[in-house]
Image (spheres, rainbow, N blue to C red):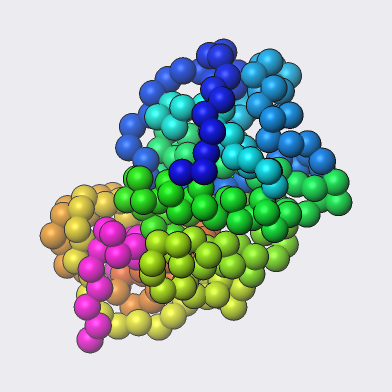
């Protein structure tokens, strides 16, 4: 892995020292700090990050990739409250990552140039690091998220305003993993439904939800349950199936097996 370990000291704001459980995803961010390098951010967060509960595991610029917090530890990078749905903090991928994504993900921050862009070299290094992490933790591009996908924050802003760049990134990671490229996200509209007819069989115990944005878990489905589905919804950077009963469940092939009718 093209990654240097330069861990900051444990402190309550930017490296709390708590251990994480399993790794279910990787979340991509940008620093929103034009011209500042990965090492600039290492020193900033090493000094307590201005007394804010914030940070990330990895910072990448056009020259280097630095791991400033051990990957098996918690970072405060993806549980911020940006908007509310039904009176509760929006969590776009809670069905896969849990209610607090900090406990199940690795956070990667990409540094931006003085003009606010993500340099090609930074992009390429982020691809390399992300692909290596996917191999290490047995993840795929379905397990990659923008900060935006998880809490609704405009981050990484260049990939929110231009979703084709996010797709290009995932395609590049997919190529490193030896797989086919992913469907172009820029051609999808959130919550647009693909009319599908068939059944799914759950491969694990799963939550089901009352709406297509992981709004509220209304129950659980046992492993091995067969459900009839009518739609496949793209929302929050991931697909969900709509069942005949009107509930929603993840469409990830890691958790359900679809059979067409």
Query: Which quarter of the rendering shows the C terminus?
Result: bottom left
Location of residue 221 in the rendering, given as x and y in whole percent from the top left corner: 22, 54
Location of residue 174 in the rendering, given as x and y in whole percent from the top left corner: 45, 65
Q: Residue at x 40, y 29 (%)?
A: 72
Residue at the farthest right position: 115
Q: Residue at x 16, y 54 (%)?
A: 223
Q: Is residue 250 left or right of residue 125?
A: left
Q: Nearer the viewer, residue 220 or 91?
A: 91
Q: Residue at x 30, y 65 (%)?
A: 253
Q: Total number of numbered labels?
A: 0
Q: Is residue 215 left or right of residue 164?
A: left
Above or below, 167 against 230 in this view is above
Name the quadrant containing residue 59: top right
Q: Is residue 43 left or right of residue 18?
A: right
Residue at the farthest bottom position: 261
Location of residue 89 in the rendering, given as x and y in whole percent from the top left corner: 55, 41
The verdict on residue 52 being magenta is no
Q: Residue at x 32, y 55 (%)?
A: 208
Location of residue 77 in the rendering, given as x and y in whole percent from the top left corner: 57, 35
> Magenta part of the protein: which range?
244-261
Q: Nearer the viewer, residue 116 or 240?
A: 116
User: Is any part of residue 173 visible from this angle?
Assistant: yes
User: Is any part of residue 211 visible from this angle?
Assistant: no
Residue at the farthest left position: 224
The verdict on residue 248 being magenta is yes
Q: Is residue 44 left or right of residue 191?
A: right
């Amino acid at each position: 892995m093209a990654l240097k370990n330069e861990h900051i000291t444990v402190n309550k704001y930017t490296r709390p020292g708590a251990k994480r459980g399993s790794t279910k995803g990787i979340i991509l961010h940008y620093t929103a700090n034009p011209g500042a390098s990965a090492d600039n951010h290492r020193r900033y967060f090493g000094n307590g990050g201005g007394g804010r509960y914030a940070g990330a595991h990895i910072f990448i610029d056009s020259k280097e990739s630095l791991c400033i917090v051990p990957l098996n530890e918690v970072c405060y990078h993806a549980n911020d409250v940006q908007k509310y749905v039904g009176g509760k903090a929006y969590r776009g991928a809670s069905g896969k990552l849990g209610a607090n994504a900090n406990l199940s993900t690795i956070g990667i921050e990409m540094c931006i140039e003085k003009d606010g862009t993500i340099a090609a070299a930074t992009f390429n290094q982020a691809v390399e690091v992300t692909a290596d992490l996917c191999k290490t933790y047995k993840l795929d591009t379905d397990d990659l998220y923008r900060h935006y996908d998880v809490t609704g924050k405009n981050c990484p802003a260049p990939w929110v305003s231009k979703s084709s760049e996010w797709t290009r990134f995932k395609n590049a990671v997919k190529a490193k993993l030896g797989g086919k490229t992913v469907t172009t996200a820029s051609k999808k509209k959130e919550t647009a439904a693909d009319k599908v007819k068939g059944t799914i069989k759950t491969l694990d115990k799963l939550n089901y939800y009352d709406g297509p944005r992981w709004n509220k878990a209304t129950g659980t489905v046992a492993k091995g349950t067969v459900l009839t589905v009518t739609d496949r919804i793209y929302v929050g950077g991931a697909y969900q199936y709509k069942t005949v009963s009107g509930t929603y469940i993840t469409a990830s092939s890691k958790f359900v097996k679809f059979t067409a009718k």
